[in-house]
Amino acid sequence: MSQERTIALSTGWGMLAVNLVCLLLGPVLFFAGIGFAANNQDVAAGLLIVTGIVLFIGTLISLNGHLTLQPNEACLINLFGSYVGTARDSGFWWANPFYTKVKLSLRARNFESSKLKVNDKQGNPIEIAAVIVWRIEDTAQASFDVENYEQYVKVQSESALRHLANSYAYDHGEAHETTLRSGLDEVSQALRNELQDRLAKAGVRVDEARLTHLAYAPEIAQAMLRRQQAEAIISARQKIVHGAVSMVEMALRELSEKNVVHLDEERKAAMVSNLLVVLCGEAEVHPVVNAGTLYN
């Protein structure tokens, strides 16, 4: 596994001044040599001409060593195939012109996965998608240990997302079990941890991972919707019955404690039945008023 090592570069302003002087001096020496040649001073002329040409060409090569780095940008430096180091400081710099310089952005990037059709832990087909926020942490690993780090991030992100979906139930797990719908924070953290393990070999750091789409697959969506509606109706009915029983119990207790009326067991049963019909019925109840005695 490759490992990044940071190097410091020379400031570019001093070398820029030297290069500009040499860039002007080279032609001056060249034309001065031509002047000496015209005066039949061949030795001096040859020396000046060669010096001027070499100086001019060398200056052009030296100018290739200048580079500019912006904030959150790094430059990977190689020399004839050997890794020299990585420059991370922003500014105007100069390095050996024979260095091969590759700039890499260290800024955070987003990867938005497409909607993946997978099965959850219970085998239900679902659709899931996520957004991953990542950045390069080790430039040497990103450049040398994988062929294409951006493609690597894409492939590993989708693989981790599929594995995550297979590890959790969609929304009907066992008691106290985390599901994809009920435990979004925990699920997102699990996705981030798995991605970090997968992408560490590419020198990538995962800042954030969260689900952006979660739904049943279209072929079972209607069936699951009816199931959810039935469960909601059952849950509501349970609460209604529990409340109705509590109200009936309270009514009978209050009538007995305050001696409002004394009812035998048969009349209590009739009263309980009528109250439950009134309290639990879906349609509006129209009461029948008894104008006679209690037992008529």
Image (spheres, rainbow, N blue to C red):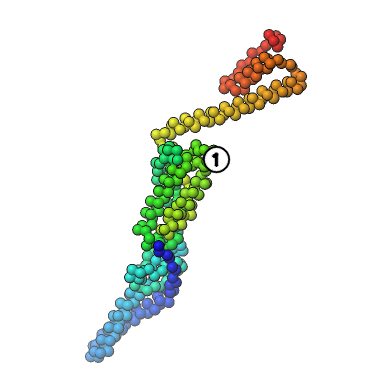
Q: Quarter of the image containing the N terminus?
A: bottom left
> Residue 266 location in percent, x, y?
67, 14
Q: Quarter of the image containing the C terminus?
A: top right
* Residue at the spot 42% in from the left edge and 38% down from the top edge: 123
What is the tally of numbered marks visible in this picture? 1
* Residue 74 appears left or right of 277: left
Of residues 253 and 60, the one nearer the viewer is: 253
Q: Residues within 10 Å of mark 1 (few under 14, many from 20)?
A: few
Of residues 258 and 88, the one nearer the viewer is: 258
Q: Is residue 63 visible?
A: no
Quarter-wise, where is residue 165 in the image? Answer: top left
Q: Is residue 57 visible?
A: yes
Image height check: is 82 above or below 165?
below
* Residue at the spot 33% in from the left edge and 74% down from the top edge: 61
Q: Secondary structure at mark 1?
A: loop
Q: Which residue is mark 1?
A: 176
> Residue 80 location in percent, x, y?
33, 70
* Residue at the spot 46% in from the left edge and 62% down from the top edge: 72
> Residue 185 location in percent, x, y?
52, 46
Image height check: is 180 above or below 32?
above
Quarter-wise, where is residue 246 in the image? Answer: top right
Q: Three-letter amino acid code at disc 1?
A: His
Image height check: is 107 above or below 32?
above
> Residue 168 location in percent, x, y?
47, 42
Quarter-wise, where is residue 197 in the image? Answer: bottom left
* Residue at the spot 45% in from the left edge and 52% down from the top edge: 195
